[in-house]
Image (cartoon, rainbow, N blue to C red):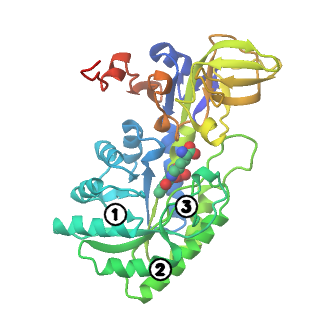
Amino acid sequence: MNHFDYRDGTLHAEAVPLAEIAARVGTPFYCYSTATLEHHFRVFAAALATAGLDATVCFALKANPNIAVVRTLAALGAGADVVSEGELRQALAAGVPPARIVFSGVGKTRHELEFAVAKGILQINVESEPELLALSEIAAARGVRMPIALRVNPDVDAGTHAKITTGTKENKFGIEWTRAHEVYRRARDLPGVEVVGVACHIGSQLTDLEPFRAAFLRVRDLVAILKADGFAIRRLDLGGGLGVPYDDGTEPPPHPDDYARVIATTLGDLGCRIVVEPGRLLVGNAGVLVSRVVYLKEGATRTFVIIDAAMNDLVRPAMYEAYHHILPVREADPQAPCALKDVVGPVCETGDTFARQRPLPPLASGDLLAMCTAGAYGAAMSSSYNSRPLVPEVLVKGDRFAIVRARPTYEEMRAFESLPDWL
Ligand code: LLP
């Protein structure tokens, strides 16, 4: 569900024509819909509440750290899941209270741990013994006991793209399932940490609930073992991962209601507060990447639609063979025949391809195209490869829009570079 629709033959974000934004900010740009962000948060939070769960929804900033996006969600009560000092600073700047922030990640530096402890966040999800020892030392030196969960690796295959599967024993994440109890015991004896929970996250863009169920049942078993051993486990952080529809004709992902029911049936009776860390689900369908057709080129075997967005702006197709639906901003004449085309960017790599042999209506140079479901891991993963400026981000609310990240100038892009004195 989203708020990008055709009105009077032209694609709008809520009540704003995308062409109007393009005229103001230039292309390419990301555009986010406030109504869609709010809708997704409310549906997700309501699903958890309806399932009878005492839950905190911590938005995974990695999906979209834009301050206006985070503030929009924070205003509805969202917390934050962060994986770096930068994200933690971003969450705080957006107005997320420290008491609603969890810090995940496999390689938090001592400096990052110190910063998180100093800010008094809700919890740190510890992913290894060396991290546990470092954190205890840091917190003890400040005279505090930092609330922690150990992120366990349940060895469950999420059945998603290999690059975004995180919960099998071949993955770098978490503490090996079979060793978890031993590490919990170690944590108990440390002066700077207080064990409050168990955390797990098995992967992203899951379209099947069974891997969640399997992982949650393992968490349940572990909680039983820990409670029997005297641990006061009161929080379960179940990670993120619920998929979104990318409209590629594949099976739609489960509804949040069904996801919440899986949590309730596997863990609902343990008397623990549930923390979830959705990223994509909250922001994916709330964003589009708008770009302009630069040229149409007839190749030997196919037609190339060359657009002004590239893999540096949206890397998902190049990196994960991801499908993004592509809509012409000017609504296509329903009578006009679609033809198969390749949609490509200007970057000098064959991987800079958004779609291969995609049925598209007739297009001309200058036409605008919207790449859908680009609100998650779009701008967040963008770079300035090929010395292309990061694209601006725009947030729409009703009939208003605002630039929430500006396009840098070339001078700004060069500002951190300098020549050594021998040049
Ligand atoms: N929590 C942890 C510990 C995570 O590692 C992640 C995602 C999330 C929560 C949020 O997962 P989500 O609800 O968004 O699935 N760049 C890839 C996705 C990488 C996901 C990494 N971790 C993509 O574009 O598909």
Q: Is residue 193 left or right of residue 159?
A: left
Q: CA distance from mark 2 to mark 1?
A: 18 Å
Local SS, label 2: helix
Image height of 246 relative to 213, above or below: above
The mark found on residue 123 in the picture is: 1
Quick check: 371 above or below 178? above
Q: Residue furthest front?
A: 422
Amino acid on which disc 1 is placed: Gln
Q: Secondary structure at mark 1?
A: strand
| Residue 185 x, y percent position in the rendering | 37, 82
**What secondary structure is marked by label 3?**
loop
* Residue 302 pos. (x, y %): 80, 20
Which residue is disc 3 drawn over? 171
How many neighbours does mark 2 have within 10 angstroms: few (below 14), some (14-19), or many (20 or more)?
Answer: many
Give the residue type that dot 2 points to. Val
Within-10-Å neighbours for mark 1: few <14, some 14–19, many 20+: many
State the quadrant of the C terminus.
top left
Q: CA distance from mark 2 to mark 3?
A: 22 Å
137 on left or right of 214: left
Residue 247 appears in the picture as rendered: yes
Residue receiving disc 2: 223
Residue 266 location (% of width, % of height)? 57, 74
Tell me the number on the disc at residue 332. Answer: none
Task: Kindly report which numbered mark, 3 or 1, lies closer to the viewer in this rendering.
Answer: 3
Q: Earlier in the sequence, mark 3 or mark 1?
A: 1
Q: Quadrant of the N terminus?
A: top right
The residue shown at (44%, 26%) is 390
